[in-house]
Image: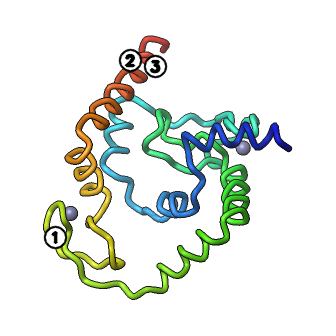
Amino acid sequence: MSEVLTASAEATAAEPPHPNLLQRGTRSHTPPASHKRNRESGASIPSEKRCAHCGENHPAAAFLRNERSADGLSSWCRTCHNEATRRWRAEHPERVAADNAARRRPRVELSCVECGAVFEGRAGQLVCGRRCKDARYRRLHPEAYRAKRARKNRRRREREAAA
Ligand SMILES: [Zn+2]
Ligand SMILES: [Zn+2]
């Protein structure tokens, strides 16, 4: 069991199985613009892929879409994702309870600290969405953002060199 846990802890660092993150991915109906760019730049979704967690080959439909990954698919299959989510929820009952309580709080009208737009959200929420969340991060942590982008570009060059 400890071996399994170690392996999943490693993968978790790259892809935290917090249920909110998974739900956000499945709930979006229109693919974000970044996904389109990804597809246009030549990356295409493979028909089959090996799950980084269970190590088995599955058809593309067995993976959640992830526009941030190189091939447009999540690195874990849905079954592994679901299992990790179930385990995470079982191990963090207090976080689950807090999430549920937050969901029960009524939505209020807020104004985005980044773009000033008025939006509906939960008390304490600062930005109107993903775009402003990223913009705020770039503004508050320019060094970290540059380092992150440099890593990303380096990985892309390595992929292109390998292809
Ligand atoms: Zn799997
Ligand atoms: Zn905003």
Q: Residue at x 36, y 78 (%)?
A: 122
Q: CA distance from mark 2 to mark 3?
A: 5 Å
Residue 19 located left or right of residue 160: right
Ligand 1, what quadrant? Answer: top right
Q: Where 96 sits versus 75, above or below?
A: below
Q: Nearer the viewer, mark 3 or mark 1?
A: 1
Residue 94 located left or right of residue 101: right
Q: Position of residue 70 (x, y in %)?
A: 47, 33
Mark 1 burial class by Cα count in 10 Å: few <14, some 14-19, many 20+:
few
The secondary structure type at the circle numbered 3 is helix
Q: Position of residue 71 (x, y in %)?
A: 50, 35
Q: Residue at x 15, y 62 (%)?
A: 115
Residue 35 occupies which quadrant of the picture? top left
Label 1 CB less than 8 angstroms from ligand 2: yes
Q: CA distance from mark 3 to mark 1?
A: 39 Å
Q: Where 52 sits versus 151, above or below?
A: below
Q: Quadrant of the N terminus?
A: top right
Which of these two is toward me, 82 or 41? 82
Which of these two is toward me, 25 or 90? 90
Residue 116 located left or right of residue 102: left
Res. 157 mark = 2
Residue 10 located left or right of residue 40: right
Give the residue type at disc 3: Arg
Res. 80 mark = none
Proximity of marks 3 and 1: CB atoms separated by less than 8 Å: no
The secondary structure type at the circle numbered 1 is loop
